[in-house]
Image: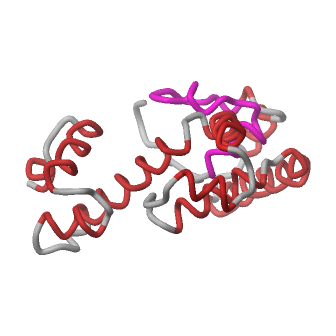
């Protein structure tokens, strides 16, 4: 992109992609989604282009998402939504076994529904959330030693954390922190 531009970001729960836009989450890995492909996407783009006020643009997107929610809320998998909230509330430090037992579904059914809505298995989602928590702690410098991050975020030991960190980022936490 060249020239000046504005970026408005809305963070949505993973299950929203499937429920609202009929998009499999895994298709967006390292990819973008063209809003024009969504229902009334062209209208939304035109409305945004015709408004120069950022607050009005945010209101347009908010109303669009709310209207989609009202239209699609009956199709939402509330069991998966509840599982996601539990995972987020616990920083990814949740056993999948505890989730499907708490939500009163079989393991296979739960994993299939979760994969369908989110695009990855619940265990993988827990690992991503756990990593995100540790990355945020590293970024905000809310630790005195690396082991603080390791144990605050449920990793077995420092070498386990370093392996996971390197798998996600390609570098070690020490290099990241520089």
Relative depth, front residue between 63 and 4: 63
Residue located 41% across and 48% down the image: 127
Relative depth, front residue between 172 and 153: 153
Where residue 112 sits, quadrant-wise, is top right
Q: In this view, does 60 lie to the left or right of 75?
A: left
Q: Is residue 163 left or right of residue 65?
A: left
- What percent of the width, then of the height, locates residue 91? 44, 63
- What percent of the width, then of the height, locates residue 104? 74, 56
Residue located 66% across and 29% down the image: 24
In the rendered structure, does residue 25 fall within the stretch colored magenta? yes
Quarter of the image with the C terminus is bottom left
- What percent of the width, then of the height, locates residue 141? 20, 69
Q: Is residue 175 left or right of residue 38?
A: left
What are the residue bounds of the magenta stretch? 13-35
In the rendered structure, does residue 105 fall within the stretch colored magenta? no
Relative depth, front residue between 42 and 106: 106
């Amino acid at each position: 992109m060249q020239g000046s531009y504005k970026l408005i970001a809305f963070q949505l729960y993973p299950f929203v992609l499937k429920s609202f836009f009929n998009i499999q989450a895994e298709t967006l890995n390292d990819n973008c989604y063209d809003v024009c492909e969504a229902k009334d996407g062209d209208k939304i783009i035109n409305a945004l282009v015709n408004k120069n006020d950022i607050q009005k643009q945010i209101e347009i997107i908010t109303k669009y998402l709310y209207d989609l929610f009202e239209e699609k809320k009956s199709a939402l998998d509330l069991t998966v939504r509840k599982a996601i909230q539990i995972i987020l509330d616990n920083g990814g430090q949740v056993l999948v076994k505890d989730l499907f037992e708490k939500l009163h579904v079989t393991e296979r059914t739960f994993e299939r529904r979760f994969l369908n809505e989110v695009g990855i298995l619940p265990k993988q989602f827990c690992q991503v959330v756990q990593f995100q928590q540790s990355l945020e702690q590293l970024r905000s410098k809310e630790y005195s030693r690396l082991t603080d991050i390791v144990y605050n975020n449920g990793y077995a030991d420092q070498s386990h954390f370093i392996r996971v960190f390197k798998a996600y980022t390609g570098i070690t936490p020490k290099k990241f922190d520089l």
